[in-house]
Image: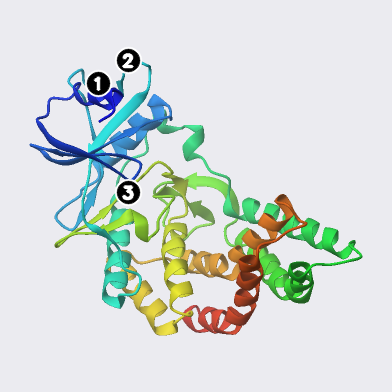
Amino acid sequence: MNEKYVEALEQYELEIFSVRKGRGAWICETEDGCKLLKEYRGTVKRLEFEDQVLGALDTGSALRTDRYVRNREGSLLSMSGDGTRYVLKDWFLDRECDLKDGREIRLAAERLAMLHQGLRKIPFQEEWNLGSILVEPLEIELERHNRELQRARNYIRGKRRKSEFELCVIGNYSMFYEQAVQAVEGLKGLWEDTRAASLDSTGSTGTKPLYLCHGDLDQHHMLMGDGYTAIIEYNRMHLGVQAMDLYRLMRKVMEKHSWNVDLGRSMLEAYERILCMTRKERRCLYYMFLYPEKYWKQINFYFNANKAWIPARNIEKLRSLEEQQASRNRFLEQIFEG
């Protein structure tokens, strides 16, 4: 074991039985259960923010989080002799959520709703007003993406000789770009004041309801235990619209299940059994799905990479998105009708 890590571990009041490498960190079996030691490159303020939020969450038997462990000096950070900073946190050896298992997918949606419900109960502290938790409004971000789509399309149009990828872009650009514009306009008109933050707003007024969100929710960060789900990695937690977390999870599932309407509907039902969404929150979720995010990612990769050579798999991905468009549109119409 690297001596630096030994130096860090020695700063905790824990009897450590074994240490092994895993997840780019060190998994430690201790007298107090499994822990994870990892390097930390963020600020102390950010770390304290995450610790306070996770400490305030009511994580009962069904929901658990990877809370930080303080060292014997009471600090969240431990430093080795060469100045490398480490954090230690509770860890879980359970497997990731299986996106092929419908029952488990619905359970994940339910546990996400539990997390969101818990985060809404935590009073916002003035000292949490950090740059890292104040993210750009979604409609502003997507409007920028639309300009990037236009710039790439104009570049391709100006080329005399076009590659297979570029011809594919020209062929399906209008279909995807129209949806991109509709999504941005819809989000802009959803709340009267897109800049207002109200932690206790129900969304029934014109104010956008902003709550603490996980910020990086996918199957890799949902570990399915025996009778509980551990939702981990809160380094992108921020103030925002919680529907974005649900969108990220659902989009991953829908892409793997060919935009299965029944499965999508059952995920929403599982989520809303715990936490009901307002009409505007559901509409916001619709516009997130309407925006062709994966199409933008492919175009943006092309424009910012070596345009002279595009891997064959990227051409296949672009064609696959076009092939999925009919089932994706059907999903949008049937899930969000009315």
Front-most of residues 317 and 199: 317
Q: Nearer the viewer, residue 44 or 139?
A: 44
Q: Residue furthest top?
A: 81
N-term-proximal mark, 3 vs 2: 2
User: In which quarter of the view is residue 30 placed?
Assistant: top left
Q: Residue at x 66, y 70 (%)?
A: 315
> Between marks 1 and 2, how big is the CA–CA gap?
7 Å
Density class for disc 1 (Cα within 10 Å; few <14, some 14-19, many ≥20) is some
Q: The residue tagged with tag 3: helix, strand or loop? A: helix
On screen, residue 243 above or below 137: below
| Residue identifier under label 1 | 7
In the rendered image, residue 296, in percent from the top left (x then y), is placed at 65, 61
**Which residue is denoted by mark 3 in the rendering?**
119
Q: Is residue 227 left or right of residue 242?
A: left
Local packing at callout 2 (Cα closer than 10 Å; few below 14, some 14-19, many 20+) is few
Q: Residue 262 appears in which quarter of the rendering?
A: bottom left
